Amino acid sequence: EDKVVQSPLSLVVHEGDTVTLNCSYEVTNFRSLLWYKQEKKAPTFLFMLTSSGIEKKSGRLSSILDKKELFSILNITATQTGDSAIYLCAVEGYNNNDMRFGAGTRLTVKP
Amino acid sequence: KAGVTQTPRYLIKTRGQQVTLSCSPISGHRSVSWYQQTPGQGLQFLFEYFSETQRNKGNFPGRFSGRQFSNSRSEMNVSTLELGDSALYLCASSFYLGRQGSGETQYFGPGTRLLVL
């Protein structure tokens, strides 16, 4: 059965810290892995990863995928209070047409 | 350009009733996807419509249905409501078939919060 597991479930850090969020998955015929940030209601898209070992970067955020070990990490450097949110990981396979979401990691950044 | 709009924003129903939620995509977008978010289950994909046809479907019972109109607006219907249907229902639109894996960016609406008593 396809599954997506995120860890940790919650994390509390102070401004300036660096955090690493994990997402491991099992999916038939993997197509892509996506990261979202959800602050209040609707999630916003961060990254889409399809190839192993290629880092995607956007400002202080970066992400990389390991298709051999079936996981991805999302790094946030020099965290700010505005980074406080739930970070969701989702995986798509070619066989089924829906997205499997992890439970999310709730990140709290304290001043 | 206006974003994705969803109505109503909040809704309270009782068990056994049925409910219809509405989503208006960004102008020009032809794909609408629906998601359910609950604290216990996280975000789950319901279905996706493109050009008035359901193209993809998640693992939800038949009580959950939807449709898309010629102007790309979409409605989602849940019949015989159960307590477990209480959730935030999110709609997302994109120009073509929507999920990020296709290369298309999805834009989410603010959601409809449904409470079933």
Image (cartoon, coloured by chain):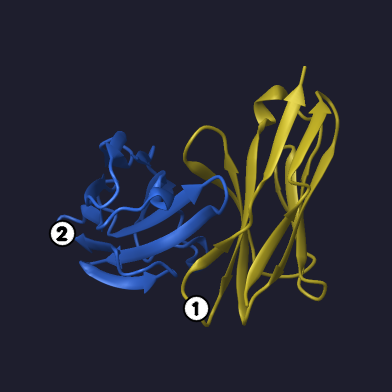
Q: Please identify the quarter of the rendering in which residue B70 is found.
A: bottom left
Label 2 belongs to which residue?
B69
Give the letter of the yellow chain.
A
Residue lying farthest left?
B70
x then y, percent, for residue B67? 21, 62
Label 1 belongs to which residue?
A96
Asked which secondary structure carries label 2, the reply is loop
Residue lying farthest right?
A17
- The residue at the point 40 percent across, 67 percent down is B60
| Chain name for mark 2 | B
The amino acid type of the residue labelled 2 equals: Phe
Residue lying farthest top?
A111
Q: Is residue A23 visible?
A: yes
Left or right of B26, for residue B35: right
Work out whether B85 lies above or below A77: below
x then y, percent, for residue A106? 69, 39
**Chain B: what color?**
blue
- The residue at the point 65 percent across, 48 percent down is A104
User: Is disc 2 surrounded by few (<14), some (14 to 19) or many (20+) residues within 10 Å?
Assistant: few
Asked which secondary structure carries label 1, the reply is loop
The amino acid type of the residue labelled 1 equals: Asn
Image quadrant containing the C terminus of chain B: top left
Q: Please identify the quarter of the rendering in which residue A94 is found.
A: bottom right
- The residue at the point 63 percent across, 78 percent down is A1
Work out whether A66 lies above or below A39: below
- The answer to which of A100 and A93 lies nearer the viewer is A100
| Chain name for mark 1 | A
Work out whether A16 lies above or below A36: above
- The answer to which of B84 and B55 lies nearer the viewer is B84
Could you tell me if the residues under marks 1 and 2 are in contact, i.e. CB atoms within 8 Å?
Answer: no
Q: Please identify the quarter of the rendering in which residue B48 is found.
A: bottom left
